[in-house]
Image (cartoon, grey):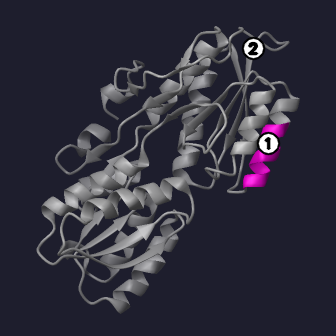
């Protein structure tokens, strides 16, 4: 991982000027630790689990914090129940990776009423007062689209693997891609199907598409797991070398695939920078400081030319 990502500065982060006063009073629990409740959207999701683990490792390095972790398991009601439990435990702050953009709002509002600061990590939420630390997913799709518009041949045909249906990050990544592709009238989306963020589903769908579409120029996925599955199917059909492939997240497996020439490009979502920002916000809450309402970490394009910086 490149040095600028691991640096503990927030210099890579674009911070909005709007300020939100939260955590006005420095508070700690009976054990003299600042207690945080963390509810993940789904530990079975590789990217979500990686971000959770990064947060755990970072917070563990500071003995003034105690973190209670729960798994929302892609169940909005379960995640709301977990927030209720955090409120009962009188945690000092709640960090969420929301299962659902709108579904998380009642939980945030309950925490607001209990005067508990809320941090939404990675994923945005539809309402309530919270600090958002994340990346704009529309930009990830737009970045994919810009590369494709510049590099696809004339009359190109694309197959698209979308993330979990209805989730805001999935919708925004798709919109960013599709809006950008419209700048070229000769590009056609042959088919779109959700791979539910899973490598096995990406492979299964690609196997079906290979039977249905004899000619296509690119396979684009809204996350790396799905495109890595699709790549396995393309390799099995001896079609990988003639097809452009694209993902999002720049997981380690995806970066290795870029390095090996199997994945054309991916878009890096900077989890280390997000987690550094989350730690910084928690520390400032602990000290009763003013906190920015939004902390935005930009996406970055990863290709064969720069992939070594991300491995």
Q: Nearer the viewer, residue 27 or 262?
A: 27
Q: Place residue 187 in its image quadrant.
A: bottom left
| Mark 2, residue position | 33
Q: Earlier in the sequence, mark 1 or mark 2?
A: 2
Q: Position of residue 28 (x, y in %)?
A: 77, 12
Question: Would residue 290 be found to the left or right of residue 247 on screen?
Answer: right
Mark 2, residues whose alpha carbon is within 10 Å: few (<14), some, or many (≥20)? some
Q: Position of residue 263 (x, y in %)?
A: 28, 61
Q: Which residues are magenta?
A: 76-84
Q: Position of residue 310 (x, y in %)?
A: 31, 40
Mark 1, residues whose alpha carbon is within 10 Å: few (<14), some, or many (≥20)? many
Pointers 1 and 2 in contact (CB under 8 A)?
no
At numbered mark 1, what does the secondary structure look like: helix, strand or loop?
A: helix
Q: Place residue 232 in its image quadrant.
A: bottom left
Question: Would residue 90 be found to the left or right of residue 297 on screen?
Answer: right
Task: Report the residue at 64% width, 8% height from top.
Answer: 287
Q: Is residue 69 visible?
A: no
| Mark 1, residue position | 82
Vertical arrangement, residue 29 with respect to residue 59, above or below: above
Q: Nearer the viewer, residue 39 or 25?
A: 25
Question: Would residue 146 be found to the left or right of residue 106 on screen?
Answer: left
As measured in the structure, the alpha-carbon distance from the residue carrying label 1 to the one carrying label 2 is 20 Å
Q: Place residue 145 in its image quadrant.
A: bottom left
Confirm whether the magenta stretch covers residue 101: no
Q: Position of residue 211 (x, y in %)?
A: 36, 91
Q: Main secondary structure of the magenta part?
A: helix
Confirm whether the magenta stretch covers residue 83: yes
Vertical arrangement, residue 309 with respect to residue 256, above or below: above
Instruction: Spot the residue most to the left.
Output: 154
Task: Report the residue at 77% width, 22% height from top.
Answer: 115
Instruction: Spot the residue most to the right.
Output: 88
């Amino acid at each position: 991982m490149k040095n600028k990502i691991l640096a503990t500065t927030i210099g890579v982060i674009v911070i909005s000027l709007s300020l939100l006063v939260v955590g006005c009073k420095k508070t700690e629990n009976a054990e003299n630790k600042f207690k945080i409740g963390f509810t993940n959207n789904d530990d079975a999701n590789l990217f979500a689990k990686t971000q959770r683990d990064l947060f755990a490792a970072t917070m563990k390095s500071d003995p003034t914090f105690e973190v209670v972790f729960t798994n929302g398991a892609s169940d909005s009601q379960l995640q709301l129940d977990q927030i209720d439990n955090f409120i009962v435990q009188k945690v000092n702050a709640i960090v969420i990776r929301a299962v659902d953009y709108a579904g998380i709002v009642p939980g945030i509002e309950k925490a607001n009423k209990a005067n508990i600061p809320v941090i939404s990590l990675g994923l945005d939420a539809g309402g309530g007062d919270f600090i958002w630390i994340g990346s704009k997913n529309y930009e990830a799709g737009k970045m994919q689209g810009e590369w494709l518009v510049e590099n696809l041949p004339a009359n190109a045909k694309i197959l698209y693997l979308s993330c979990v249906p209805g989730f805001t990050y999935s919708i925004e990544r798709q919109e960013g891609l599709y809006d950008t592709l419209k700048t070229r009238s000769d590009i056609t989306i042959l088919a779109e199907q959700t791979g539910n963020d899973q490598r096995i589903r990406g492979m299964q769908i690609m196997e079906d598409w290979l039977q249905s579409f004899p000619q296509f120029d690119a396979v684009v996925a809204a996350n790396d797991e799905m495109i890595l599955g699709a790549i396995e199917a393309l390799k099995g059909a001896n079609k990988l070398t003639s097809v452009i492939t694209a993902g999002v997240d720049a997981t380690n497996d995806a970066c290795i695939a870029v390095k090996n020439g199997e994945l054309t490009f991916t878009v890096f979502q900077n989890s280390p920078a997000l987690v550094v920002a989350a730690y910084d916000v928690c520390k400032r809450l602990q000290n009763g400081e003013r906190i920015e309402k939004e902390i935005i970490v930009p996406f970055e394009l990863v290709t064969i030319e720069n992939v070594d910086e991300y491995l």
